[in-house]
């Protein structure tokens, strides 16, 4: 799988709660193949004290419009800086990274061994599950059951995206 480094444009940076935001980035070029469970490293620019790229699970991908979404919690200087990105700004992203989930690998196929699938996540742990759920439904005709948890009701986010 080919990794690319691209300047992606901020399409939307939507706060979901005081500590979590959904960052949607767009590409003028077609996106490379991306598997559920892969991640990207995002460069935090315009700061003198954040040197390394930050890794984030890919929350969702729209190959038709060339959008990638990231579900991000503000925990440090880097994520707080990313939360300030505005529509139209650009960010340097290295992706897709990692192996992703083994969905239809002959040796370890959840599709061949399961008649039903349960996906469970809480907090930022839900980040890779939306793209996985959509992939299972669209590519493998399996509609998974999804459980989302959080510390409190206000920490259970993006439920409407999983219902679709």
Image (spheres, helix red, strand yellow):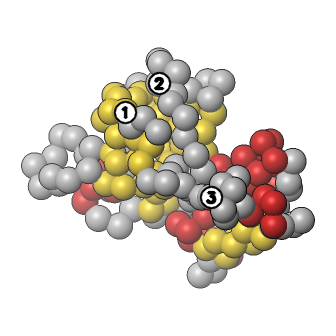
Residue 102, which numbered label? Answer: 3
Q: Secondary structure at mark 3?
A: loop
Q: Secondary structure at mark 2?
A: loop
Residue placed at 56% from the left, 26% from the top? 66
Camera-side residue of 120 and 89: 120
Residue placed at 67% from the left, 76% from the top? 149
Residue 4, which numbered label? Answer: 1
Query: How dense is the environment of label 1, judged by Cα within 10 Å: few (below 14), some, or many (20 and up)?
Result: some
Judge depth for marks 1 and 3 and give the one in front. 3
Camera-side residue of 130 and 100: 100
Q: Most extreme residue toward the bottom, as rendered?
A: 151
Residue placed at 26% from the left, 50% from the top? 53
Residue placed at 34% from the left, 48% from the top? 41
Residue 112 lies, in percent from the top left, at: 81, 60
Query: How dense is the environment of label 3, judged by Cα within 10 Å: few (below 14), some, or many (20 and up)?
Result: some
Position of residue 124 in the picture relative to residue 84 (left or right) = right
Q: CA distance from mark 2 to mark 1?
A: 12 Å
- Provide the residue designation for mark 2: 27
Q: Is residue 61 something one can see in this rendering?
A: yes
Residue 159 lies, in percent from the top left, at: 73, 59
Position of residue 95 in the picture relative to residue 108 (left or right) = left
Q: CA distance from mark 1 to mark 3?
A: 22 Å
- Vertical comparison of 1 with 129: above or below: above
């Amino acid at each position: 799988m080919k990794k690319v480094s691209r300047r992606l444009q901020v399409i939307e940076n939507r706060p979901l709660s005081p500590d979590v935001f959904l960052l949607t980035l767009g590409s003028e070029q077609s996106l490379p193949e991306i598997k559920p469970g892969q991640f990207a490293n995002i460069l935090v620019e315009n700061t003198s004290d954040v040197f390394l790229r930050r890794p984030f699970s890919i929350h969702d991908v729209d190959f038709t419009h060339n959008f990638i979404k990231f579900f991000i919690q503000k925990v440090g200087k880097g994520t707080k800086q990313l939360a300030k990105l505005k529509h139209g700004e650009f960010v340097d992203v290295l992706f897709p990274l990692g192996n992703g989930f083994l969905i239809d690998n002959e040796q370890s196929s959840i599709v061949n061994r399961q008649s039903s699938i349960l996906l469970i996540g809480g907090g930022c742990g839900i980040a890779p599950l939306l793209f996985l759920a959509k992939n299972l439904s669209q590519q493998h005709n399996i509609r998974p059951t999804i459980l989302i948890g959080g510390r409190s009701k206000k920490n259970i986010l993006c439920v409407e995206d999983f219902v679709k």
